Image (spheres, helix red, strand yellow):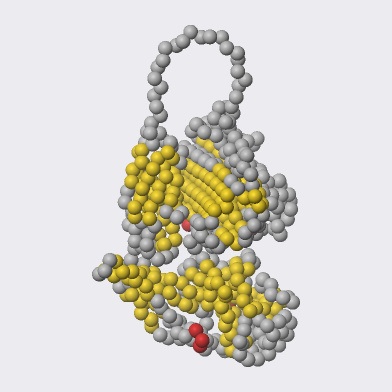
Amino acid sequence: MATKSPTRKPRTNTKSKVKVVNNRSTVRPSGGLRSRWGTVAVVMAFVLIGFFGVVWARAATETSTLWSTSTVPKTITDSDSQSVELGTKFKAQYAGKVRGLRFYKGPQNTGTHVGNLWTSSGRKLASVTFTNETASGWQTATFATPVNVSANTTYVISYFAPKGHYSANEGYFSKARLSGALTGLKSGTDGGNGVYTYSNASAFPIKTYRQTNYWVDVIYTTERFDPSVKPLAPTNLKSSVNGTTVSLTWTNSASTGVVRHTVYRNGTAIGDGLAGTYTDSLLTQGTTYKYKVVAVDNTGAASDPSNEVSATIPSAPTPTPTPTPTPTPIPTPTPGPSLGCTAKANEPGNQDPWGSCWPNGSNTGVPIGTTLSTYAGSCTVTTNNLVLDAKTINCNPLLIRASGIQITNSKVNGSIFIEDPNTNYSFTITDSEVDSGPIINGYTVDTSGIGKSNFVATRVDIHGGFRSAWCEYNCTIQDSWFHDQAYPADGVSHESAIRMGDGSTIRHNSIWCNAVEYKEGGCSADLTGYGDFAPIRNNTIDKNLFVASTGGACAYGGSSGDDGSKPFGNQASNIVFTNNIFQRGQGGKCGFYFPITDFLHGDGTTPPGNRWENNIWDDGTTLPPAS
């Protein structure tokens, strides 16, 4: 990648800063984002209460870029004339939106320029063609729809230069470049920075050259919050009881920026609710439970709890003794299964210890007798509260970009995905089958059956794909059957049945990673959770059957790499394993080496909030946790 050595340091970018005072914001003007965009705009909203009261909103909108419009590259026109995609890796401190991009143009950088936003793995999130360009200087384009981006997550902003002659500064990303909530990554933080790919058309940039900055900038907005002000509490919490299940409903917090509503049972967080609802199942008969709900915003600030409600699970009725009648000879009946499942315990489809059946293909998936019709809608769902019932859905993936989507009694040939955890998008899938098919082009998020956030899955039969389910953030998986992941044809994919991140409730499932091994590919574990990209925390794993796996373990506890080999390995917390049953399998260890690993720190201490209670082998003996 040809560049000339820089002889002077680019001018320092100064940005307008938002200062929040008494829930109002002021702007200290400095460099700012100028030109056609004007100085950074700060918008404060307020809510009228009745006719007299005014409550100021907690949020202010702030627009940021990595460089000011007065910044000029050292090398404005490089001599390289090949067509090339050029980009910058960046992170944002807060969840927000990318509205567009800019690049610096020299007079020989001609042709049609196309701008793109990508995930760090190469998924294109948005694209736009630049119009009304000037002969040189900063060129700006906005996406048709702003793209939600997560906090502290690497993205790539890039543009295609068909005639080359881009602007460049060698060595620029030898250190991180900070601007407000944005960071241009230091080379080596997440691979090299200052990325490019030679191509005849726009393509994901993956190569680097001497930490060179090619002057591609992101236009990012976020809502900033005064952390001293709590979100408003959820209200109107109500409960109802049906057998051993408690259903909760409430009115969500009215505050801006709330990203989850956490449910507490008897003072302990048990999961996050979607759209003001939560179902707590398989509870103990004759027991009273108390519930509250707390709202949490994207700064981590928590509201006061909602009103408290109590729910009592009825005791099992005591049978009334009856006189023993004189027996009358009758024909011996043909033995049949109890409860729809056979008497042998701790196998998928057979009886569990709580009076029901472990999930398998007979009690999950599309109910027998359901007539399916082909779904003819878009594979990108943007209509809120859409119901897809009794459908064959041929989408890989079915992207959810709306809230309250319901998928019932359906067969999905592909995957179902919410890409960004920090959105209001959500879906439920019930009594359905997901066949996510083979692994395509190695590891991609598309080849998980369902994911990655804000979903509830109940009685779902999931197979195929790189993993059956990925719960990166805020999901509930219950009464479902995970099995038969795809053949790792690339020879390197490390597969799992479920991967957990932050805010998973995984209850009463049959979890089995049994992908065929090929070269270095195959199962890691039934349940995984690694601290590569974010801390593993706030996960409840209760009353599941861990089927003996071909992987090294049956479960990972979240503290992998706490010796520093993974950036978030030592930040695991609030991982709760209760009442789970682990099959011993042929080797007696569930996995090849052990049943559970990395639940404790490497020194044997317990991460904060972690609990390990009543977990046993399938022969009834106690199973201890492990580091």
Residue 199 relative to residue 217: left or right: right
Residue 26 relative to residue 470: left or right: left
Occupied quadrant, residue 208: bottom right
Above or below residue 358? Residue 29 is below
Residue located 42% across and 65% down the image: 257
Q: Tag count in the figure?
A: 0
Quarter of the rendering occupied by the N terminus: bottom right
Q: Is residue 210 visible?
A: no
Q: Nearer the viewer, residue 13 or 568?
A: 13
Above or below residue 519? Residue 84 is below
Residue located 45% across and 11% down the image: 324
Q: Nearer the viewer, residue 73 or 132?
A: 132
Residue located 57% across and 60% down the image: 381
Occupied quadrant, residue 167: bottom right
Q: Nearer the viewer, residue 248 or 513?
A: 248
Q: Is residue 26 visible?
A: yes
Which percent across, then down, holds residue 425? 51, 60
Which percent across, then down, holds residue 20? 35, 74
Above or below residue 36? Residue 193 is above
Residue 286 relative to residue 442: left or right: left
Which percent across, then down, holds residue 298? 43, 64
Residue 334 relative to residue 50: left or right: right
Q: Nearer the viewer, residue 177 or 489?
A: 489
Which percent across, then down, holds residue 445? 62, 58
Residue located 26% across and 69% down the image: 51
